[in-house]
């Protein structure tokens, strides 16, 4: 019986994968490294072919399979699919146009506006928008107040003397108050956002962080422009701001409208509960009617 030359070669030399060069254990039919099928023909063909051809075959058969492993890992960059609000696109549409279009969308299509809010880790742009629009709303409101107070002051000065002078003085204070409006807007913006965010956390609706809540409150200040309407403008602005905040929280934090509304009204509910509780407990602290037997 003739001996198989391949058996002699296998005993004299270690078994090496012809595709990747890994050392093989006798009896394997697949290479544990490159998972190529191993046969006697391919196993000992390695010794017969030129070195440069083996290298070409290795490049074709192995390197493509392990290409992803050889390539350095690249840092994942998340790019928002949202196009941004008109205010975010002010460099292309114009500064004034960006403000006007954002105000229009907050007033007439808040759902669409807040669906385009970009969460990029920065609140700077939203803060600037709120300071501009919020301060403008305050100033317009004070202007109407000054006009009506001056008109009333003229009447009272003619009829009641010193009382009219007092009202004129209060009007002057109101005019000075207009110029510090941005400070009050800034303080109110952060305090309001913080309170609203805490309420949002209580109801389990915090999905986009404080940044999302802050941007909702900031863009909702666009409703303050309704103060341009005398007498009832401020009231309408306040009501519409609540509506805008509910819609904004729902879109930005991706929660239900009911949960967003609960977060917005929670401070009012708590305050009403405290007032009611104080009303019930007040007779016990200050003493109620005592009845003697």
Image (cartoon, rainbow, N blue to C red):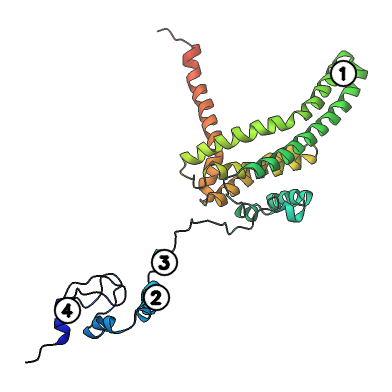
Q: Which residue is mark 2?
A: 59
Nearest the eye: 66 or 84 = 66
Number of the front mark, 2 or 4: 4
Label 4 vs label 3: CA separation? 34 Å
**Residue 153: x percent and y percent?**
87, 23
- Residue 68: mark: 3
Nearest the eye: 13 or 216 = 13
- Residue 164: mark: 1
Mark 1: which secondary structure?
A: helix
Label 2 vs label 4: CA separation? 25 Å
Quarter in which the N terminus is drawn: bottom left
2 up-or-down from 53: above or below:
below
Cβ atoms under marks 2 and 1 closer than 8 Å: no
Q: Earlier in the sequence, mark 3 or mark 1?
A: 3
Cβ atoms under marks 3 and 1 closer than 8 Å: no
- Residue 10: mark: 4
> Going by the image, does 60 lie left or right of 101?
left
Cβ atoms under marks 4 and 1 closer than 8 Å: no
Residue placed furthest toward the top: 292
Label 2 vs label 1: CA separation? 96 Å
Number of the front mark, 4 or 1: 4
């Amino acid at each position: 019986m003739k001996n198989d030359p391949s058996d002699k070669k296998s005993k004299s030399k270690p078994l090496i994968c012809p595709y990747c060069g890994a050392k093989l254990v006798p009896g394997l039919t697949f290479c544990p490294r490159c998972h190529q099928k191993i046969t006697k023909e391919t196993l000992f063909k390695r010794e017969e072919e030129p070195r440069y051809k083996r290298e070409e075959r290795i490049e074709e058969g192995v390197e493509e399979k392990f290409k992803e492993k050889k390539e350095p890992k690249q840092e994942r960059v998340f790019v928002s699919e949202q196009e941004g609000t008109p205010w975010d696109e002010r460099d292309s549409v114009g500064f004034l146009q960006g403000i006007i279009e954002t105000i229009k969308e907050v007033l007439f299509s808040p759902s669409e506006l807040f669906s385009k809010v970009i969460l990029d880790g920065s609140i700077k742009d939203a803060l600037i928008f709120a300071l501009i629009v919020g301060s403008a709303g305050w100033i317009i409101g004070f202007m109407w107040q000054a006009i009506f107070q001056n008109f009333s002051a003229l009447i009272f000065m003619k009829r009641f003397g010193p009382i009219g002078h007092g009202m004129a003085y209060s009007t002057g204070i109101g005019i000075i108050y207009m110029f510090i409006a941005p400070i009050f807007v800034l303080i109110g913006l952060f305090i309001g956002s913080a309170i609203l965010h805490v309420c949002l956390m209580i109801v389990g609706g915090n999905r986009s962080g404080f940044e999302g809540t802050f941007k909702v409150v900031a863009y909702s200040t666009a409703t303050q422009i309704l103060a341009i309407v005398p007498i009832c403008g401020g009231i309408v602005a306040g009501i519409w701001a609540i509506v805008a905040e509910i819609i904004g929280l729902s879109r930005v934090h991706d929660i239900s409208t009911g949960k967003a509304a609960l977060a917005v009204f929670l401070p009012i509910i708590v305050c009403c509960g405290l007032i009611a509780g104080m009303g019930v407990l007040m007779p016990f602290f200050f003493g109620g009617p005592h009845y003697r037997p």
